[in-house]
Image: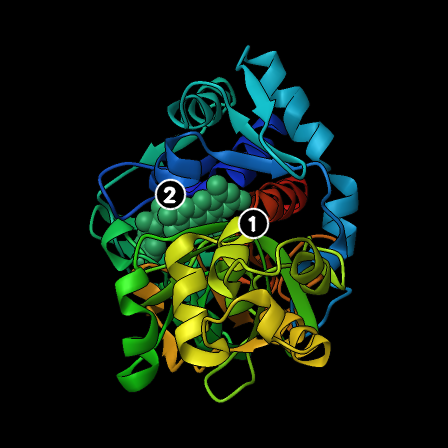
Amino acid sequence: MKWDVLVVGGGAAGLMCALVAGQRGRRVCVVEHTKRVGKKILMSGGGRCNFTNLGVTPESFLSANPHFAKSALARYTPQDFIDLVDRHGIAWHEKEKGQLFCDSSSKQIVRMLLDECHAAGVHITVSCSIEKVERRADGFAVDTTHGAAECESLVVATGGLSIPRMGASGLGYQLARQFEHTIQPTRAALVPLTLDGRHLARYQDLAGISLPDAEARANGTAFQAGMLFTHGGLSGPAILQISSYWQPGDDLRLNFTPTVEPGWLSEQARERPDVSLKTVLANTLPKRLAQRLCELRFAEHPMRQYRAERLREIEQELCDWPIAANGTEGYRTAEVTLGGVDTDGLSSRTMASKHVPGLYFIGEVVDVTGWLGGYNFQWAWASGQAAGEAV
Ligand code: FDA
């Protein structure tokens, strides 16, 4: 078959690119190697798809070139995607911090993209793998398990390496290398952190305990959000966010009490001198965590027995608690992959390869990774739109 545009990968970015190109009258085929398209959309946001974030700015993305995402993000905004969602009558709500979720189900987002693709005449082939890609004078020759295809433009939208059982593959990086693009080192991000040995032993029995408001800090970046102790280490939004900025060996600090005023323990000592430190801490922190922190560092005396200076130190320690994480849970549970196709080789306006005419890279396979909270889908929509307009 001969196509104007062949999109490899039927995820968020691939479907968006396909529908935009189809609306422009291009003959588009999407090749997806799993049985169905949009699997990550379906599982996202706890089944309700956190499809964008009202606070998207280029600063919410990590990339070797922090300027690269600006153009596409400016030309396809969260409001553009909201307009699309509204046109399809999908009810949504803002959960927190600008995060928009479907009221009902992620299935509605996949349905919407498929309806748009259908209306634009996009052909979608599932359970089809790419075996070989060759550059020709007028485009690309592609061998697939469903036969040979040709296309003028080839769009690589294969996503990252996270959650292999959902269809992640390294094909995008392989194609990038084949066409002499550089790859920024990849690693799991938005991922729980692990502890081992005595560090794990300190917290393991706290598994299941969560803090609604903690701050995680590493390498000059801090995120304030919920956190959770797990059987293997730490998780929750603050931890997932900081995982993108932390690597084994880096210093990692937690602030268990980001919302209290300095001097709160001295005030408690004046007001409740006979109450134990553990009980005071348990008013602000989960009881078992308060007890563990006392066991590890502070002892458990009545408040009057602590000198004012020691109370200030304890406050400081609660705000600056070192955590010796040894790694992450890896791609098995990571929401995204950091790194990817180096943006130096791509046009920030169109996502086109700078040295192979007709070749495009979009979505997570590119070295642009967003924070937790709808940012990664917004990048998928925006980069998909940018390429869809250009192919
Ligand atoms: P995506 O992974 O969506 O699509 C790639 C497609 O290519 C897949 O269908 C894959 O099967 C296919 N493919 C791979 N290799 C192939 C090959 N060799 N041949 C053919 N096809 C191939 N983000 C967010 O903003 N809000 C959220 O709520 C969530 N929630 C969330 C939950 C979980 C559990 C995960 C794992 C991830 C999220 N994310 C998220 C991240 C978000 O899902 C992700 O950033 C986007 O899906 C990336 O879109 P892409 O289209 O680039 O890749």
Give x and y (percent) for residue 373.
Answer: 57, 45
Q: Nearer the viewer, residue 75 or 89?
A: 89
| Residue placed furthest toward the top | 89
Disc 2, SS: helix
Picture layout, residue 298 above or below residue 260: below
Can you tell which quarter of the image residue 331 is in?
bottom left
Residue visible at 40% across and 23% down? 105
Residue denoted by label 2? 40
> Ligand 1 near label 1 (Cβ, under 8 Å)?
yes
Q: Nearer the viewer, residue 117 or 247?
A: 247
> Ligand 1 near label 2 (Cβ, under 8 Å)?
yes
Can you tell which quarter of the image residue 39 is in?
top left
Answer whether residue 348 is visible to the viewer in this image: no
- Which amino acid type is marked by label 1? Asn
Picture layout, residue 30 above or below residue 93: below
Residue denoted by label 1? 376
Picture layout, residue 312 above or below residue 114: below
Residue visible at 62% across and 22% down? 84
Picture layout, residue 304 above or below residue 30: below
Give x and y (percent) for residue 10.
Answer: 39, 42
- Which amino acid type is marked by label 2? Lys
Disc 1, SS: helix
Can you tell which quarter of the image residue 316 is in?
bottom right
